[in-house]
Amino acid sequence: MNFRPLVLLALFAAPLTAQLKPVPAPSAADRASVERLERSLAHDSMEGRGTGMPGSTKAARFLASEMAKIGLTAAGDSGFFQKVPMYVPLPRPADTSANAAGGRRGGGAGGGRAGGATGLPAGFRLVTAPRAPTASTEAVACLPKDGRGRTAYDIQKAAYDSLLPIYQRRLAAGDTLDPLPAQGGRGGGGRGAGGPAPTRLPSLADLDTVPLERRRNAVNVIGMIPGSDPVLKNEVVLVLSHYDHLGMRAPATPGGDSVYNGADDDAAGTVAVIEVARLLKKAGSPKRTLVFANMTGEEVGLIGTNWFIAHPVFPLTQIVAGFEIEMIGRPDSLAGGPGKAWLTGYERSTMGDMLKQYGIAIVPDIRPTQSFFTRSDNIGLARRGIVAHTLSTFNLHTDYHQLSDDVDKVDFNHMTGVIHSAAEAVRHLADGPKPEWHDGCSPQAPASAAGRGRGGK
């Protein structure tokens, strides 16, 4: 009997995983490397990595040096740097009244200002009607569900139905005022101790129209591992994070804390991108090209990612998957605890189930009301048709966007385990089948948002 056809059939039927070189298991040296990088990025000397600020420049140089040590190929327009043209606008009257956290005063619903043109008493705003939810235009199967099987729309609709009668009764009784919420919160967003936030210019050439003292240095940090397959090397898997955070603020008390270190958001994800690159560089040559990008300006509107999309290092049509890593510094019990992570928008594409098939410790995001899929850099790519998701273990801790998001609260064993899973995931994306959107689940950018995108975790 001629058995050759059977042998060939068995070879073609073999799973693609059999062709992959394994990613080394986590080690004590891996954990030490993770901790070194995390403590460096979230150190006070980085000044909160505010977009366009000196601390961000220092962080970018540190990341580029780490990419060079790993042996990545520089993929920016200036070595590992992709320049993003930024400047600081002249202050406006509203900017001159910044509060201690770098924000602006006032601005609640109904104006938020005392007296004057609004006619409202100090500290109050008009009662506003509850916002009616709008049904998603996407297939119901694309929307994540919580533990009770409810989508975000279901939950918001129930809240609206309960709040509307209360609003109507208050108006009927003449009760029309609510106290303004307390000031404070997220801080300067890269402003330093107040003043206008750095703003992106349309092009690098436009920097010549801005005085030197108002120009700001901002860069994405990009390296790559070229693909080895004669055909698949022309396809790209983009692994990304954002390394910016909220900068600094004037301390609330003399000698108090003034740095938004952003240890979890997103020094942790940035470290993961560097470590995944290191692990995969050691594991051998991937079939597809891997691009590792640490983006700037996520916290101020996806500035770095939108610039990358407008000026990609590879044509966007060659990017077959986007894999962002954000906020993995602490375990999430809903994901299964230490070492386990969840994937935003899991239901929208085949990516999550593909990774689950390979035994990777990644589950769906089960907090649908948080809309995490649309709150990171991945959404800018997804709205252009690229299958792009974010890996995270954010457990809704109260240090989010606060001065207290410090490195001493990071669980390094958990973080090292998640990074290993992320490296395995990226290796499968590099050598295995391409992920695809489920029918009707690719997000569509509103016409008015073309080329912009929204940040705002």
Image (tube, rainbow, N blue to C red):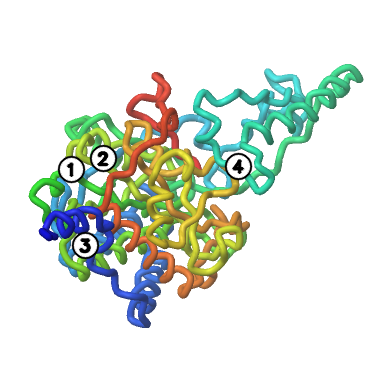
Q: Are marks 1 and 4 in contact (CB under 8 Å)?
A: no
Q: Earlier in the sequence, mark 2 or mark 4?
A: 4
Q: CA distance from mark 2 to mark 3?
A: 32 Å
Is residue 271 among what the camera can see?
yes
Q: CA distance from mark 1 to mark 3?
A: 28 Å
Q: Position of residue 50 (x, y in %)?
A: 40, 51
Is residue 262 among what the camera can see?
no
Q: Is 434 left, or right, of 376 in this rendering?
A: left
Q: Are marks 2 and 1 in contact (CB under 8 Å)?
A: yes
Label ID, residue 313: 1
Q: CA distance from mark 4 to mark 3?
A: 35 Å
Q: Is residue 294 above or below residue 338?
A: above
Q: CA distance from mark 2 to mark 4?
A: 32 Å
**365 and 401: which one is in front?**
365
User: Residue visible at 75% across and 34% down?
Assistant: 123
Q: List the residue tagged with mark 2.
A: 308
Label ID, residue 145: 4
Camera-nearest label, 2 or 4: 4
Q: List the residue tagged with mark 3.
A: 19
Tell me the kind of residue under disc 3: Gln
**61 and 361: which one is in front?**
361
Q: Earlier in the sequence, mark 1 or mark 4?
A: 4
Tell me the kind of residue under disc 4: Lys
Q: Position of residue 186 (x, y in %)?
A: 55, 48
